[in-house]
Image (spheres, rainbow, N blue to C red):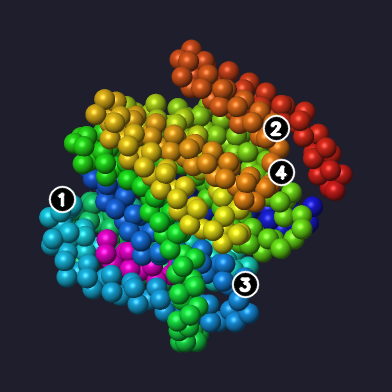
């Protein structure tokens, strides 16, 4: 059990580094909903969708390649320096080209060139900290990682509160604040806050650049690029699945107010993402470091079962209490028109977490291109269903496309993985846990009389917990015995 204990400890710390910033990000959602109409929040959501999309392009799979080669190469400093120099050069080149063509990008995207300028700088700063953050994870220094991540979001949150809430009130009678304050510039202040937070994060990690051995190994770089390129394709496909729906909704003339409502309610489903993201941060280095053990397949199978157990409980809990969460995160009723998407988004992110477990096989056998192919299939499902469904059912079509895309990826990865790298998953138990959670979630949310009382939802959670206990008595007995 010490192996699982180590994984649990790492996941817990990375979870803190993920959950707290995400929780602070939820406060930002509440802030934007309180002080911005749905139409403006829709515009912000579209710009952030572009930002996340280009974040993937600027990293071009180098983060995952770094982990792979850091664990396999004897000269780890060479891996660090080569990957850092690569990202530094590509980032500077991207920033120069972006600034040169800023006006044309603005015309093409219908986004103000001022916002384009801020977005380019944020993208560049975020790209420059990819390897320093990856190095902290690879060296097993999650506490420093957590502190910097949390500080970044805290600064961002504080600046948002200052610019959007306090500055309009305080600027009267203060010459300095009057110069800073610009009316009708709320969206601009959002990006300025992000920019300052990203800059301070780079400053905190800047010592890594001063300690760097500035040696670039061309042969190693080519190997890393060959390994990372499929990850890039998979990342682009993932960005399409996760965020491109906002862009597509705008392209297909869905009102920005509807996009704002969709984006706000989408955030409620992100509680499942907290668990999934924290788990992924802890599990990826673990998968690689444990790959040479003979018991690796059995270990991966057990971990996947535990993920489904806890993930099913979390997803059911979020769906049961979705109407409570909306009062905390999205209190304006003008945003509630999109509440029906919440269960779909929660389950979609759960499927993505299961896919993360199932995808370990192609990373371990250095067949990352297979992951790219699977992600491309998912992206095609997303694009096709969005195009087909949005004209008829609007943003609900985007939510349906998301869950079907991740479900397709999950199924394909499992089918191929069992042929290439067989892992003895307990299909019966996993299927029962997933199926029971899904049925209970549908009943508790979409049947109005059951949704209104919460009695059924609470009973459903208790019943699911009892069902798990009766099926996992040996596990619980082992844990209690160790205590």
The residue wearing badge 1 is 110
Which residue: 68% across, 47% down?
423
Mark 3 and mark 4: Cα distance apart in space? 26 Å
- Residue at 52%, 41% in the rendered image: 412
Q: Earlier in the sequence, mark 3 or mark 1?
A: 3
Q: CA distance from mark 4 to mark 1?
A: 51 Å
Q: Nearer the viewer, residue 122 or 395?
A: 395
Looking at the picture, how far across and down is residue 233, in whole percent? 40, 56
* Disc marking residue 424: 4
Instruction: Select label 4 or label 2 by which is in front.
Output: 4
The magenta-colored residue range is 119-131
Single out the residue that lies furthest toward the front: 419
**Magenta span contains residue 122:** yes
157 sits left or right of 299 in the view: left
Query: Residue 126's image quarter?
Result: bottom left
> In terms of secondary structure, what is the magenta stretch mainly?
helix
The residue that mark 3 highlights is 72
Residue beneath disc 2: 429
């Amino acid at each position: 059990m010490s192996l699982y204990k180590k994984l649990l400890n790492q996941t817990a710390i990375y979870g803190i580094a993920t959950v707290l910033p995400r929780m602070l990000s939820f406060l930002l959602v509440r802030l934007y909903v309180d002080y911005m109409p749905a139409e403006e929040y829709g515009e912000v959501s579209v710009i952030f969708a572009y930002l996340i999309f280009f974040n993937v392009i600027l990293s071009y799979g180098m983060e995952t390649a770094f982990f792979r080669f850091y664990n396999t190469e004897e000269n780890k400093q060479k891996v660090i320096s080569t990957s850092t120099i690569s990202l530094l050069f590509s980032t500077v080149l991207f920033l120069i080209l972006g600034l040169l063509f800023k006006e044309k990008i603005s015309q093409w995207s219908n986004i103000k060139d001022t916002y384009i300028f801020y977005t380019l700088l944020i993208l560049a700063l975020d790209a420059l900290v990819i390897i320093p953050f990856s190095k902290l994870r690879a060296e097993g220094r999650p506490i420093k990682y957590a502190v910097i991540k949390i500080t970044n979001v805290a600064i961002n949150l504080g600046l948002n509160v200052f610019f959007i809430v306090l500055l309009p009130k305080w600027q009267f009678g203060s010459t300095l604040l009057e110069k800073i304050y610009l009316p009708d510039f709320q969206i601009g202040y959002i990006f300025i806050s992000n920019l300052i937070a990203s800059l301070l994060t780079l400053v905190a990690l800047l010592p890594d650049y001063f300690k760097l051995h500035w040696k670039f190994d061309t042969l190693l770089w080519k190997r890393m690029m060959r390994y990372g390129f499929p990850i890039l394709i998979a990342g682009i496909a993932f960005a399409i699945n996760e965020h491109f729906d906002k862009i597509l909704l705008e392209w297909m003339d869905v009102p920005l107010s509807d996009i704002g409502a969709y984006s706000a309610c989408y955030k409620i489903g992100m509680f499942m993402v907290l668990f999934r993201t924290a788990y992924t941060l802890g599990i990826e280095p673990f998968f690689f470091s444990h790959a040479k053990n003979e018991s690796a397949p059995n270990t991966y199978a057990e971990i996947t079962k535990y993920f489904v157990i806890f993930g099913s409980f979390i997803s059911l809990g979020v769906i049961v209490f979705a109407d409570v969460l909306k009062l905390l995160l999205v209190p304006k009723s003008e945003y509630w028109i999109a509440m029906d998407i919440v269960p779909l988004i929660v389950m979609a992110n759960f499927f993505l977490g299961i896919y993360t477990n199932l995808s370990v096989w192609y990373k371990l056998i250095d067949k990352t291109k297979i992951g790219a192919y699977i992600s491309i299939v998912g992206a095609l499902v997303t694009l096709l269903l969005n195009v087909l469904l949005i004209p008829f059912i609007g943003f609900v079509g985007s939510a349906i496309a998301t869950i079907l895309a991740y479900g397709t990826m999950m199924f394909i990865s499992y089918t191929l993985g069992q042929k290439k790298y067989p892992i003895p998953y307990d299909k019966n138990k996993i299927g029962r846990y997933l199926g029971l959670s899904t049925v209970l979630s549908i009943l508790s949310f979409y049947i109005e009389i059951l949704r209104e009382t919460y009695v059924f939802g609470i009973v459903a959670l208790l019943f699911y917990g009892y069902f798990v206990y009766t099926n996992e008595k040996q596990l619980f007995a082992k844990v209690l015995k160790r205590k």
